[in-house]
Amino acid sequence: MAQGNNYGQSSNGVADESPNMLVYRKMEDVIARMQDEKNGIPIRTVKSFLSKIPSVFSGSDIVQWLTKNLSIEDPVEALHLGTLMAAHGYFFPISDHVLTLKDDGTFYRFQTPYFWPSNCWEPENTDYAVYLCKRTMQNKARLELADYEAESLARLQRAFARKWEFIFMQAEAQAKVDKKRDKIERKILDSQERAFWDVHRPVPGCVNTTEVDIKKSSRMRNPHKTRKSVYGLQNDIRSHSPTHTPAPETKPPTEDELHQEIKHWQMQLDRHRLKMSKVAESKEPGQQRVKRWGFGMDEALKDPVGREQFLKFLESEFSSENLRFWLAVEDLKKRPIREVPARVQEIWQEFLAPGAPSAINLDSKSYDKTTQNVKDPGRYTFEDAQEHIYKLMKSDSYPRFIRSSAYQELLQAKKKGKSLTSKRLTSLVQSY
């Protein structure tokens, strides 16, 4: 490749001995070709009911482009290569924290080059604290903290108790700057910043691709003695990760010392797994989440717990078929194309065919259009029917759910402070 001679050098011309840099440069060369205006992946703005999703492309677009432009015969190999790029944060799913590639209609967005891993980012925990704190100040459903992020925020607040005022002031200043940006630009930048932290502080259970392999690191002649923070470059012999620590010039450890070290890290790993499992098992929504469901039906549908509560309410009224149909169509849009025809027939037989067990009510125009679409099945076969059902739920089922005793009791229970996450976030806001 034309850039082959530059792979070992950083942007300032100094030789970069990071064992991952060669991989980064090769990936970035492919990403640059993907973003080419003529021969790259088509980037578009997608309309989703009442909102627009800017600058996105689908997972199947990526797989097709890789297959065509890199002469890859096996789609599975193309999917694997795309997943590696996603894991390093070069593009990311807009509605998921797990950085993986799916060969379906899932929407993805390119990461800005500023956040590419070749820039040698090693953000500190204080940077992460500022980011999470800023998220709590922004009243957007897409920016609401996940359970593991809320746990991280509470842990960081305890760790940085003495300088939390400084962290809070920085987060507040960044939030004010973000509010001045254009709405579409702000939405894109928010998603790119979230994806950056998904790479450097991944979801529990996901691989951290920013760590240098310890075997490769030990073979480096002059390991890195600088780290790059989100706020600039800092000189420091020590690194935050044990895998980045230069090997000390001492005698090799004895067998007993190695056993003790392995035992120590195994205990640390077990403790970490226990903490993460507790977070994963906790499905209790906080007051902020429950209250947000009342802002609009979209808020309830975006939240897994909100969907579950909405569905339970509809089941109690023997009218859950509309929501189940809507969810089935949403799932259809994310299926691999080879599974779509069979899934279209399943949805038709369950909800729309004569004598269907869970028949839904459609107007004649939507039903006729859907009947024609089923003859040539695709991911958007039920688009008209889904939109009609969405409007029905929004005008009838959703208002009854918000007025129901089930929702009101859940809301009142959260106000009494039964949610651990809610307590922590509330105390954070009240303290300032």
Image (cartoon, rainbow, N blue to C red):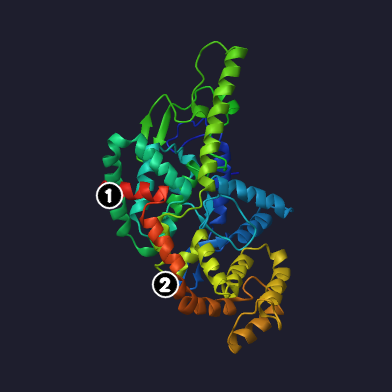
Residues at marks 1 and 2 touching, judged by CB atoms closer than 8 Å: no
Would you say residue 219 is visible in this rendering?
A: no
Question: CA–CA distance between discs 1 and 2?
Answer: 29 Å
Q: Which mark is residue 109?
A: none
Q: Residue at x 46, y 51 (%)?
A: 146
Quarter where residue 351 is shown: bottom right
Left or right? Give the position of 370 relative to 133: right
Left or right? Give the position of 411 relative to 62: left
Residue farthest toward the bottom in the current orientation of the protein: 364
User: x and y percent of residue 353 in the render?
Assistant: 70, 81
* Above or below, 219 relative to 31: above
Three-letter code, disc 1: Gln
Residue on which disc 1 sits: 430
The local secondary structure at tag 2 comes to helix
Q: Residues within 10 Å of mark 2 (few under 14, many from 20)?
A: few
* Above or below, 209 relative to 186: above
Residue on which disc 2 sits: 403
